Image (tube, rainbow, N blue to C red):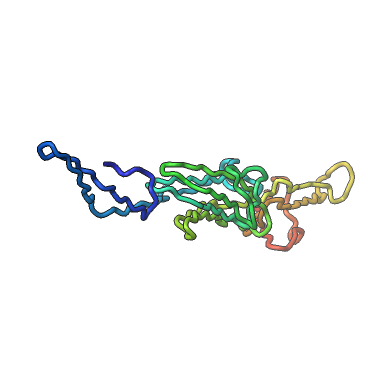
């Protein structure tokens, strides 16, 4: 005989009595035979294939306002029904959940997305998905954006996985400007007059720029006037 699946752990299988009918000459007899001791079933769910993955929907490096898609895979590869399974995914404080992106009736509560399942059959697979955007604030360049997801069964964390993405923030000088004007005014520039050069550096990026350098080549017909440049960090050469 083959034991049916699935059966809960601890289920007792007790064979029934065996009825033995026999004849001696013309007289019939009946005897009940004891089938022996029962057997206790050993079974359990198995969540060893539990996994969490993430991908930047915008592609490339992860920057501010980019959206991350998280995918959670849970499969019961054991031989027992898992009842009252909870999946809890904790969002990074730098992420904002995208409205309407949670599937499988998951709910958002106090920084976490939670799914509750009454039962998960042996061999049953569930794929859970949600999306979240990387927001500004206190996030730093190269900071790890960590999403931690736990599988809770029978009151205990049975599996836990992290999805890690690295945020990249860059300075942006695209709105910087440079202007050249006749310092003496007028519509024409004559030999011996002074040219005023004004460079405005503007960082419209996502983080400050450290250790930057500004090069201002001087055209051949012109000569730098010593001491005329902004004093902070200036160096000059006629070469």
Nearer to the camera, 190 or 27: 27
* Image spot of residue 50 (x, y percent): 45, 49
Residue at 12% of width from left, 36% of height from top?
Answer: 26
Image mark count: 0
Specify whether 189 is left or right of 204: right
User: Could you tell whether 223 is left or right of 94 in the image?
Assistant: right
Q: Residue furthest front?
A: 26
Q: Nearer the viewer, residue 67 or 202?
A: 67
* Residue displayed at 55% across by 46% down: 70
Q: Position of residue 115 (x, y in %)?
A: 56, 49
In x, y percent, where is residue 128?
Answer: 54, 44
Asked where in the image residue 6 lies, by quadrant, the reply is top left
Q: Is residue 11 left or right of residue 124?
A: left
Is residue 75 something that shows in the picture?
A: yes
Quadrant in the rendering for residue 124: top left
Q: Quadrant of residue 18?
A: top left
User: In this rendering, is residue 104 above or below 149?
Assistant: above
Q: Is residue 212 visible?
A: no
* Quarter of the image with the N terminus in it: top left
- Residue lying at 73% horizontally and 59% vertically, measured from the top left: 226
The outermost residue toward the left is 25
Q: Nearer the viewer, residue 198 or 76?
A: 76
Q: Position of residue 137 (x, y in %)?
A: 68, 57
The extreme right residue here reads 186
Single out the residue that lies furthest toward the top.
26
């Amino acid at each position: 005989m083959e034991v049916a699946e699935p059966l809960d752990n601890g289920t007792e299988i007790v064979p029934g009595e065996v009825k033995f009918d026999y004849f001696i000459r013309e007289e019939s007899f009946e005897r009940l035979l004891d089938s022996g001791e029962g057997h206790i079933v050993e079974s359990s769910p198995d969540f060893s294939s539990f996994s969490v993955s993430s991908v930047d929907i915008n592609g490339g490096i992860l920057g501010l306002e980019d959206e991350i898609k998280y995918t959670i895979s849970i499969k019961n590869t054991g031989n027992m029904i898992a009842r009252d399974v909870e999946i809890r995914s904790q969002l990074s404080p730098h992420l904002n959940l995208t409205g309407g992106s949670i599937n499988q009736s998951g709910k958002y509560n106090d920084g976490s997305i939670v799914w509750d399942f009454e039962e998960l059959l042996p061999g049953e697979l569930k794929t859970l998905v949600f999306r979240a955007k990387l927001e500004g604030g206190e996030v730093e360049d190269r900071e790890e954006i960590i999403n931690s997801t736990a599988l809770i069964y029978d009151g205990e964390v049975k599996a836990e996985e992290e999805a890690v993405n690295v945020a990249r923030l860059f300075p942006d000088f695209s709105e910087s400007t440079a202007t050249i004007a006749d310092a003496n005014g007028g519509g024409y520039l004559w030999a011996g007059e002074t040219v005023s050069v004004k460079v405005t550096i503007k960082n419209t990026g996502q983080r400050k720029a450290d250790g930057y350098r500004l090069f201002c080549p001087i055209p051949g017909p012109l000569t730098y006037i010593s001491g005329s440049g902004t004093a902070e960090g200036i160096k000059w050469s006629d070469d």
